[in-house]
Amino acid sequence: MIWIRKIIDFVLYSNIYIGLCAVALALETQILLGKKISFSPLILLVFSSTLVIYALHRLVGLSKVAQFIDKERYKVIEEYKTHIWIYAILAIIGGAISFFYLSRSVQIGLIIPGLISLAYVLPVFGGNKSLRLRDFNFIKIFLVALVWAYVTVVLPILDAQVTWTWIHVGWVSQAILFIFAITLPFDIRDLDVDQFNKVNTLPAKLGKALTVKLAILCLAIALIIGWLTFPDPFPIGLSLVLSITAMLVVWVSNKKHDYYFTGLLDGTMILHFCGVAFLWF
């Protein structure tokens, strides 16, 4: 059983898993656009950039959680530090190569989310350059939702070179609400760490119960938007996926192990893709 746990730790904390989650949502947008699934340079860039940003987030973040280094997920990240750096460097190379195969509009479209993502994980603010964007009160969850929606929905639409309509705006809004809803439980998980670092978050302000209700409300609105904007028969799959996601969010208060968060809650992004792809095939 030890080797099974090591494999799970490797997949989750090498950032390969979260990179695949980003790819899944970007491929879903291709399906919604009526395109064939294509592992294009953009998809490679989405995977590579996600892997790099999360690698930096976890490695830089270790210095912020020295007080909590005995927690399981931080111990695993510490153990896999060398691996994380190696994969991040390989991802930088892959991302740089794929960047030059993108259209000019997509290249330009990458500038703002790229800068926000780097400022989110790198300490570039404050008198001693010790603060990241995520260290400012209440801001991190909104940045996560906006950037994820932009990268996985807006960029594939730009790459497809289609004319924007209110339908596409609906897809972006649905993605923002979905990512926001599944990120709230992570803020519940990180309450003690954020309080130690003097970072106020929504769970600290609202409490756990109201935060869970807010997440469910976001999923409900996302479902309504999905029914209004997703082409048939995809709203059916979306309904199932968001129902499962809502159950996972409701159960989050009693969950302590990080597999529940990094494995199951992040995994709802892959489930989101499957709910659409299954009906598409």
Image (spheres, rainbow, N blue to C red):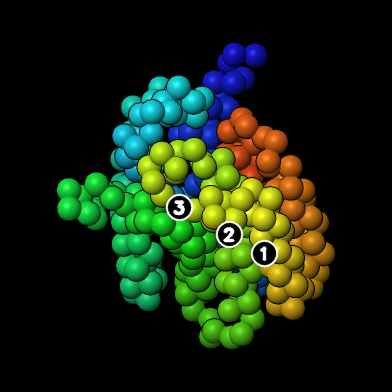
Which amino acid lies under the numbered mark 3 shown in the image of this protein? Asn
* Residue 255 location, quadrant: top right
107 and 169: which is toward the camera: 169
Residue 135, x across and y down, in percent: 36, 51
Above or below: residue 189 compared with residue 281: above
Q: Secondary structure at mark 2?
A: helix
Residue 110, x across and y down, in percent: 37, 66
Compared across the picture, whether 131 is left or right of 69 comes to left
Asked whether disc 3 touches disc 2, contact meaning CB atoms under 8 Å apart, the reply is: no
Query: Which residue is at a point 58% across and 59% down the rendered structure image?
Result: 180
What mark, if any, has residue 218 been given in the picture? 1
* Residue located beneath label 3 in the image: 200
Res. 91 in view: no
* Residue located beneath label 2 in the image: 180
Label 3 to label 1: alpha-carbon separation: 21 Å
Residue 87, x across and y down, in percent: 37, 36
What mark, if any, has residue 104 been given in the picture? none
* Circle nearer the N terminus (3, 2): 2
Which amino acid lies under the numbered mark 1 shown in the image of this protein? Cys
Question: Counting other residues with Cα less than 10 Å from the Cα at mark 1, is it few (<14), some (14-19), or many (20 or more)?
Answer: many
Where does the C terminus fall, quadrant-wise? bottom right
Residue 27, x across and y down, in percent: 59, 59
Question: Counting other residues with Cα less than 10 Å from the Cα at mark 2, is it few (<14), some (14-19), or many (20 or more)?
Answer: many
Query: Which residue is at a point 49% across and 62% down the rendered structure image?
Result: 142
Asked whether disc 1 touches disc 2, contact meaning CB atoms under 8 Å apart, the reply is: yes
Query: Which residue is at a point 38% across and 42% down the rendered structure image?
Result: 197
Label 3 to label 2: alpha-carbon separation: 16 Å
Compared across the picture, whether 90 is left or right of 72 comes to left
In this view, the mark in front (3 or 2):
3
